[in-house]
Image: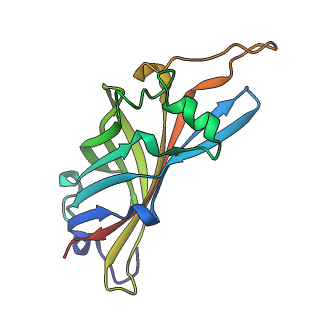
C-alpha cells in the first residue's frame, strides 16, 4: 500500500484488468517436473469495503477454452472430456462467500469454485500488493494469492500410470492469482 493510501480509501467497486492480471496453475508432470499454464480469458469484479473488509466480495468467470500451457497438443487434451470437458462446461467460476483480514496486508478469501458443474468451497490466502493511480488516471489495486486443490474433487480423474511408478499428472494442482483491478468511476 502506498504511504498515502489507507484501506477506507480503497472502498468501491472494481473490475479485474485481465490485460494486467494472471490466473494460472501448476501441476506435477511425470513425477519429475512441473507444468505451468494459465487461462487467458476471464472477467471479474470486486466490491471492497475498506472500513469492514469482511463485507468485501469478489466474483470471477474464466473461459475454459482459453487454457494455455504453451503446447497445443496438451492444451487440446486439457480441453477434452479427459479433463475440463470444455464443450459441456465452458466456464469455471469463483464467487466469494467470506473475506477475512488475517494480517496488516493479508486476507483469506473463501468462496465457491465451480469446475465441470462441481462446486467446492476453497480458501485463497491473498496478499495486498498496493494501490496506485496509473498514468491514465485509474485507481488501481493489486493482490496475489495461491491455493492448492485436488483435481479428483472436481471429477477430473484422468491419468496414466508410469512404468517407474507414480502417475503422469498430479492430483494436486496449485492455482495462482496475480490480480490488478481498476476502481469504477
In the rendered image, the residue lying farthest to the right is 164
Q: Compare residues 41 and 118 and report the one nearer the observer.
A: 41
Q: Residue at x 17, y 53 (%)?
A: 55
**Quadrant (top left, top right, bottom left, bottom right) of the C terminus:** bottom left
The colour scheme used to paint the residues is: rainbow
**Quadrant (top left, top right, bottom left, bottom right) of the N terminus:** bottom left
Number of residue marks: 0
- Is 7 on the left or on the right of 12, as rendered? right
Q: Compare residues 72 and 119 and report the one nearer the observer.
A: 72
Please provide percent x and percent y for residue 54: 22, 51
Decide if residue 50 is in sight here: no
Please provide percent x and percent y for residue 95: 26, 42
Q: Residue at x 47, y 19 (%)?
A: 152
- Is 169 on the left or on the right of 114, as rendered? right
Answer with the quarter of the image where residue 51 lies: bottom left
- In this rendering, the answer to whether 89 lies above or below 158 is below
- In this rendering, the answer to whether 54 lies above or below 12 is above
Answer with the quarter of the image where residue 104 lies: bottom left
Decide if residue 6 is in sight here: yes
- In this rendering, the answer to whether 54 lies above or below 2 is above
Please provide percent x and percent y for residue 17: 37, 64
Q: Compare residues 3 and 22 and report the one nearer the observer.
A: 22
Please provide percent x and percent y for residue 142: 41, 65
Amino acid at each position: 500500500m502506498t504511504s498515502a493510501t489507507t484501506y477506507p480509501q480503497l472502498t468501491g467497486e472494481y473490475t479485474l484488468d485481465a490485460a494486467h492480471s494472471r490466473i494460472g496453475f501448476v501441476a506435477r508432470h511425470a513425477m519429475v517436473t512441473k507444468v505451468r499454464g494459465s487461462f487467458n480469458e476471464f472477467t471479474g469484479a470486486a466490491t471492497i469495503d475498506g472500513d469492514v473488509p469482511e463485507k468485501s466480495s469478489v466474483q470471477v468467470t474464466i473461459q475454459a477454452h482459453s487454457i494455455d500451457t504453451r503446447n497445443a497438443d496438451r492444451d487440446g487434451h486439457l480441453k477434452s472430456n479427459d479433463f475440463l470437458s470444455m464443450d459441456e462446461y465452458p466456464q469455471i467460476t469463483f464467487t466469494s462467500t467470506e473475506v477475512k483480514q488475517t494480517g496488516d496486508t493479508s486476507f483469506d478469501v473463501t468462496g465457491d469454485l465451480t469446475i465441470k458443474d462441481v462446486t467446492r468451497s476453497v480458501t485463497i490466502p491473498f496478499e495486498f500488493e498496493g494501490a496506485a493511480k496509473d498514468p491514465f488516471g485509474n485507481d488501481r489495486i493489486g493482490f496475489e494469492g495461491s491455493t492448492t486443490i485436488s483435481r479428483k474433487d472436481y471429477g477430473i480423474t484422468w491419468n496414466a500410470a508410469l512404468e517407474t511408478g507414480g502417475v503422469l499428472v498430479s492430483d494436486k494442482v496449485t492455482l495462482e492469482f496475480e490480480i490488478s483491478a481498476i476502481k469504477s468511476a
